[in-house]
């Protein structure tokens, strides 16, 4: 399976490493392809790195540190609930990516 992961922080890096080790083709989206957290992920032959601006994400912003998690969690729950109401269940993230 081909999987794109934007960001290589604690979550993105862990997911990318596990999926690459299982044989999936991983495309990482980062701000600086020469210097990013988790650059050792490129030691896996299944992993490639791309500049997120070249991939069409020209206006990417960091939402801040740990103090922003509570806000992001509320947004996530909003989208999950919306998906359930629309009958899309937990698969909405994959449906949105396919559009």
Image: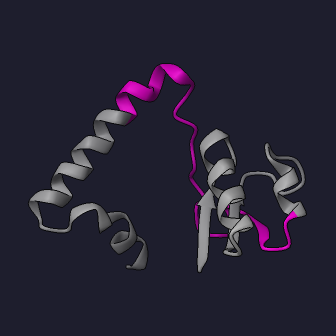
Give how far across and how far down residue 47 sits, in percent.
78, 69
The colour scheme used to paint the residues is: one colour
- Extreme residue toward the front, this view: 22
Q: How many labels does the image show?
A: 0
Range of residues picked out in magenta: 44-72
Q: Is 18 contained in the magenta span? A: no
Q: Which of 74 and 10 is in front in this view?
A: 10
- Extreme residue toward the top, this view: 67
Give how far across and how far down residue 12 sits, in percent.
62, 50
- Residue at 39%, 70% (x, y): give it: 94
Which image quadrant: the C terminus? bottom left
Tell me if residue 20 can be seen: yes
Instruction: Tell me if 67 is positioned left or right of 22 in this view.
Output: left
Tell me if residue 54 can be seen: no
Give how far across and how far down residue 93 sits, in percent.
37, 64
- Residue at 65%, 39% (x, y): give it: 10
Give how far across and how far down residue 74 sits, in percent.
29, 34
Position of residue 51 relative to residue 10, above or below, is below
Which image quadrant: the N terminus? bottom right
Position of residue 63 relative to residue 70, above or below, is below
- Residue at 83%, 57% (x, y): give it: 33
Task: Determine which quarter of the picture holds residue 2.
Answer: bottom right
Task: Determine which quarter of the picture holds residue 97.
Answer: bottom left
Q: Is 47 contained in the magenta span? A: yes
Instruction: Tell me if 26 is positioned left or right of 77 in this view.
Output: right
């Amino acid at each position: 399976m081909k999987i794109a992961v934007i960001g290589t922080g604690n979550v993105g890096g862990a997911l990318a490493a596990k999926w690459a080790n299982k044989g999936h083709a991983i495309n990482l989206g980062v701000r600086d392809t020469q210097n990013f957290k988790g650059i050792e992920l490129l030691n896996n032959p299944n992993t490639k790195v791309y500049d997120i601006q070249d991939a069409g994400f020209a206006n990417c912003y960091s939402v801040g540190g740990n103090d922003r998690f509570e806000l992001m969690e509320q947004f996530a729950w909003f989208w999950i609930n919306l998906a359930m109401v629309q009958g899309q269940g937990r698969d909405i993230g994959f449906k949105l990516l396919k559009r």
